[in-house]
Amino acid sequence: MANLPILLDYWPSMFGMRARVALREKGVEFEYREEDFSNKSPLLLQSNPIHKKIPVLVHNGKPVCESLNVVQYVDEAWPEKNPFFPSDPYGRAQARFWADFVDKKFTDAQFKVWGKKGEEQEAGKKEFIEAVKILESELGDKPYFGGDSFGYVDISLITFSSWFQAYEKFGNFSIESESPKLIAWAKRCMEKESVSKSLPDSEKIVAYAAEYRKNNL
Amino acid sequence: MANLPILLDYWPSMFGMRARVALREKGVEFEYREEDFSNKSPLLLQSNPIHKKIPVLVHNGKPVCESLNVVQYVDEAWPEKNPFFPSDPYGRAQARFWADFVDKKFTDAQFKVWGKKGEEQEAGKKEFIEAVKILESELGDKPYFGGDSFGYVDISLITFSSWFQAYEKFGNFSIESESPKLIAWAKRCMEKESVSKSLPDSEKIVAYAAEYRKNNL
């Protein structure tokens, strides 16, 4: 028990969830520590002095920061089970490209959908639907972005699905009617225990987003 | 000759330069194709429909996009010579963290230094110097960010050094007096043919930046 990896995390964070899913996919037991954003722990500040953000995975006393970096680290530190990447360099490059697409095009857009109002929210909705359609076309008829197996892009994107209900409620639109295949993919991923155990209930996220909107908009 | 990898690039781009340095570090012969931004080639638009940006490396007819992704691909596709990463997962995670830092904290800041004026430029200068000092402290007394060997973080950052003279001229400050170790590191890197052959003359960059300022500010 003394040497369990420690995950510094925050429950509604889709970035934190990525680390949870990755660790559970590998069957790695870890100690979950919830961070209080108004009073960050000394371990967080000391482990991630540059960005001061969760998730941080502290393994053998050494911190790994930034969610996609944590996922790649987990894959390389526990290589025996469920590899997140294909073995060929081109497939690996494609996976990295799409996870990066999620961070660059999807993350900002989804925030505007639930965390903004008026014109900014409308612009966010447009960007969000555009990104969703691009992702759906990349998924195509494959069961997972990783092909037959759940991989790096799946881990990077699935954590946002716990927010879908919040996007629909505050953005006033239906993701399923825009992107039925993506919704089917999300349901497929949720059948995996690594995912269902790591994502909070959609209702809790809706309440969290409502509280944010009340305080900030 | 028929199967040479093709690099779609643009000469003053520090992102394009990363791909050039990576290929030359591996001793890979490639066909360099200069893109015209006002009239992008059909191959660029078809190879990178998402971002429509250089660099794109087309290898065996398949495109790899986004500069850090290209560098990682080059490392994995030509693994025999000059590995860009250490072999241990933690060292690999650290390298990815710092290359990501360059993209997130350094890229925007440097643009404001040479491509903006007034308050925005001053804010950029402050961010730039802050980022430079953090990078210098990470370098410490090592010859390279990769330790004894030139690696992923070195490739990610060195290409900006061809712009240093432009930053100093338009930002009206001295990088060397802020960060002498980083300047010594840049000189050390420039002794490598892979770097010196891939970076344009600083004077050409200064002229390019001056032209940009004349047309845009």
Image: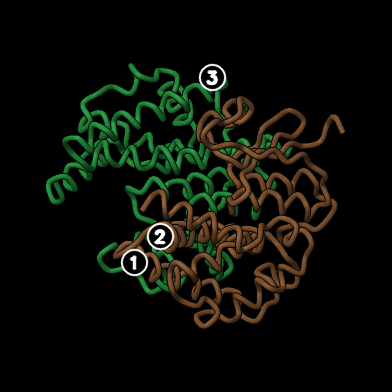
Chain colours: A brown, B green
Q: Residue A112 bears which disc, if any?
A: 2
Q: Residue A123 bears which disc, if any?
A: 1
Give residue A193's position: percent from left, percent from top.
79, 62
Nearer-the-camera pick, A49 or B71: A49
Label 1 Cα crowd, 10 Å radius (few <14 / some 14-19 / many 20+):
some
Question: If you read the primary sequence from the N terminus, does the residue marked by circle 1 or circle 2 appear first?
Answer: 2
Give above or below for A35 relative to A116.
Answer: above
Callout 1 amino acid: Ala
Element type where label 3 sits in the image: loop
Q: Quadrant of the N terminus of chain A?
A: top right
The residue at the point 21 percent across, 41 percent down is B116
The residue at the point 60 percent across, 80 percent down is A181
Give residue B106's position: percent from left, percent from top.
40, 37
**Left or right: A186, with B216 as reference point:** right
Nearer-the-camera pick, B181 or A67: A67
**The furthest residue to the right:** A1
Any part of residue B194 in sight? no
Q: CA distance from mark 3 to mark 1?
A: 44 Å
Indicate the quadrant where residue A152 lies.
bottom right
Q: Residue B140 bears which disc, if any?
A: 3
The residue at the point 23 percent across, 43 percent down is B115
